C-alpha cells in the first residue's frame, strides 16, 4: 500500500475540484423532481463542469464486467440500485423515489468525488430513515477522522450506526484514497472484518480519502445488472449512498466537497 500525503497546496487544489462537485450536486438536488429524467440531470452536470473547465471522472471509465465504458458524467442509481446506475431518458423520476447521485471531476490535475441520495418529492418513513441513517454514517466518519486514529475504529462506529438502525452495510464497494487519480490507496471500508484488521491504517495529516457508505434497507448482498455497470440490492429493497472527499488535517479533518 502506497499512501500519498498531500501538501497544503495540493489540498487547496482538491478543494477547488471539490467545490465544482458540490455545486453540481447542490443543483441536482434542487432540480430533481418528479417527471425529470436522469439523462437531463446528467446533461446539467456536464454543462456546469464544462463551465469550470473540469473533466468529469466517470465518463469513459472501463470495467471488466461491462462491454462498453461508462457513458455518463454522473452515476444515477434509483431506489434498489446501489451504485453505478446509468442515466437514461427512459428513467423518469417519480414521487416517492430516492435517487443516489455519485459525481466527480478533475480540475488542474486534482480530483474531487462526492455522492448524495436525493428524496424525490415526499418519500415514505422507511426510506427517510434509510437516507437519514446513511447520511449519519458519513457524518460519524467526519466527526472521528483525525491524525493518529485507526481506520478500523472509525469503520466500527459507522457499521454500528447502520446496523443498530436495522440496515446493512454493502461490502463490495468501499471508500478510497483520492488525489491526482480518482482511486488511490488506501481502501477504507465502512465495516470491520479480518481483512481490515490485518491491513489497518493510522490516519495521518495529508491523507485525503473519499469516504462513501452505501447502506441497504435489507440484505447487504448486491448483484450487477445486465448492462455490466448498475449494481442493485439482491432483495430489491432500497439503498442509499453518501460520500465526501475528506483531508486529514493537523487539527482533525477538512471536508473538501462542500
Image (tube, grey):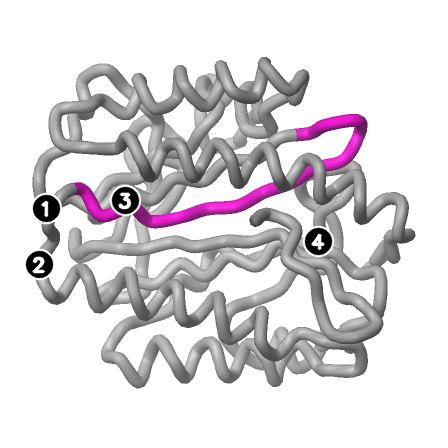
Viewer-proximal residue among 225 and 32: 32
Residue occupying image coordinates x 39% and y 63%: 135
- Nearer-N-terminus badge (4/3): 3
Disc 1 versus disc 4: distance between alpha carbons?
34 Å
Q: Is residue 258 visible?
A: yes
Q: Badge 4, how many Cα within 10 Å: few under 14, some, many 20+?
A: many
Q: Badge 1, how many Cα within 10 Å: few under 14, some, many 20+?
A: some
**Main SS, magenta residues:** strand
* Residue designated by label 3: 81
Say whether marks 4 and 3 touch (CB < 8 Å): no
Say whether marks 2 and 1 touch (CB < 8 Å): yes
Disc 2 versus disc 4: distance between alpha carbons?
35 Å
Q: Return the x and y of residue 132 as percentages of the image width and height.
A: 30, 66
Q: Badge 3, how many Cα within 10 Å: few under 14, some, many 20+?
A: many
* Residue designated by label 4: 177
Residue occupying image coordinates x 58% and y 42%: 113
Q: Secondary structure at mark 4?
A: strand
* Residue designated by label 1: 96
- Nearer-N-terminus badge (3/2): 3
Q: Is residue 218 visible?
A: no
Query: Of the residues tagged 3 and 2, which is closer to the observer?
Result: 2
Viewer-proximal residue among 40 and 77: 40
Disc 3 versus disc 1: distance between alpha carbons?
15 Å
Q: Which residues are magenta?
A: 106-120
Amino acid at each position: 500500500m502506497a499512501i500519498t500525503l498531500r501538501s497544503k497546496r495540493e489540498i487547496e487544489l482538491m478543494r477547488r475540484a471539490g467545490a465544482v462537485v458540490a455545486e453540481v450536486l447542490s443543483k441536482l438536488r434542487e432540480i430533481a423532481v418528479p417527471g425529470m429524467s436522469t439523462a437531463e440531470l446528467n446533461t446539467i452536470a456536464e454543462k456546469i463542469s464544462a463551465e469550470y473547465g473540469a473533466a468529469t471522472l466517470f465518463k469513459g471509465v472501463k470495467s471488466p464486467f461491462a462491454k462498453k465504458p461508462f457513458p455518463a458524467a454522473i452515476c444515477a442509481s434509483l431506489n434498489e440500485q446501489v451504485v453505478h446506475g446509468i442515466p437514461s431518458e427512459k428513467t423518469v423520476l417519480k414521487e416517492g423515489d430516492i435517487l443516489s447521485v455519485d459525481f466527480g471531476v478533475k480540475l488542474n490535475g486534482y480530483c474531487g468525488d462526492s455522492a448524495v441520495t436525493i428524496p424525490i418529492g415526499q418519500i415514505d418513513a422507511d426510506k427517510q430513515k434509510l437516507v437519514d441513517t446513511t447520511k449519519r454514517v458519513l457524518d460519524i466518519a467526519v466527526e472521528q477522522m483525525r491524525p493518529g486514529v485507526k481506520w478500523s475504529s472509525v469503520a466500527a462506529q459507522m457499521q454500528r450506526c447502520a446496523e443498530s438502525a436495522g440496515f446493512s452495510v454493502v461490502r463490495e464497494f468501499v471508500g478510497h484514497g483520492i488525489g491526482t487519480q480518482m482511486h488511490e490507496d488506501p481502501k477504507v471500508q465502512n465495516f470491520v472484518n479480518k481483512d481490515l484488521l490485518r491491513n489497518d491504517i493510522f490516519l495521518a495529516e495529508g491523507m485525503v480519502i473519499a469516504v462513501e457508505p452505501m447502506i441497504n434497507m435489507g440484505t447487504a448482498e448486491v448483484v450487477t445488472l445486465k448492462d455490466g455497470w448498475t449494481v442493485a440490492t439482491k432483495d430489491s429493497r432500497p439503498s442509499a449512498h453518501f460520500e465526501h472527499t475528506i483531508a486529514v488535517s493537523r487539527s482533525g479533518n477538512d471536508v473538501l466537497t462542500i
